[in-house]
Amino acid sequence: MRIFISHADQDKELASQLADQLSQAGFAVWNATQDIAPGDNWAKETGRALDESDVLVALITQGSLKSESLRGDIQHGLTSKKFERRLIPVLVGYAAFVSVRDVPWILLKMNPVYFESASRGSQEQGFREVVNRVREIAKQETNAPC
């Protein structure tokens, strides 16, 4: 199972930590920071990675909501049949958001993973929850009728 982590540039360290946790759990993870080389066509490589991925994890922080690429990835996930029930919104520091209107309403209806803060303990708990959700998706895929 291949995982695409969408995130804003300012959250690349947190995205890399999440990618490490998913990799340690046995999943293949695509992360722009690691998988796009200098000189590559960023849009083309991102599109290819989305096409090849099975799950989309959207890492959302208060600052990331202004990222056009994150919003584009989320829109792709919401409109693509392949990501139906396979888009995992991860809201970090949700209590710090100015209002719930800052977060696209549809993501709040998708049972997001919440990190109360960017503190280490909260991150570890949130990472475990993301890994468990991906495992559940993988399990459902394995049990799907042919």
Image (tube, rainbow, N blue to C red):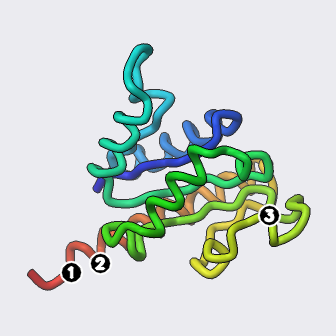
Kindly identify which numbered label has been placed on residue 102. Answer: 3
Please identify the residue farthest to the bottom as the structure is shown.
145
For label 2, the SS is helix
Q: Residue at x 43, y 30 (%)?
A: 42
Residue 105 lies left or right of residue 17; in this view the side is right
Spatial CA span between label 3 and label 2: 32 Å
* 75 sits left or right of 59 in the view: left
- Answer with the quarter of the image where residue 80 lies: bottom left
Q: Position of residue 114 (x, y in %)?
A: 70, 66
Q: Is residue 37 above or below residue 48?
A: above
Q: Which residue is mark 1?
A: 143
Q: As displayed, is residue 104 above or below residue 53?
A: below
| Amino acid at dot 2 | Gln
Q: Are marks 1 and 2 in contact (CB under 8 Å)?
A: yes
Q: Nearer the viewer, residue 143 or 121?
A: 143
Q: Residue at x 82, y 72 (%)?
A: 100
Position of the N terminus, as image quadrant, is bottom left
Residue at (79%, 52%) from the top-left corner? 62
Q: Please give the label number shown on residue 140.
A: 2
In the drawing, does residue 71 fall left or right of residue 116?
Answer: left
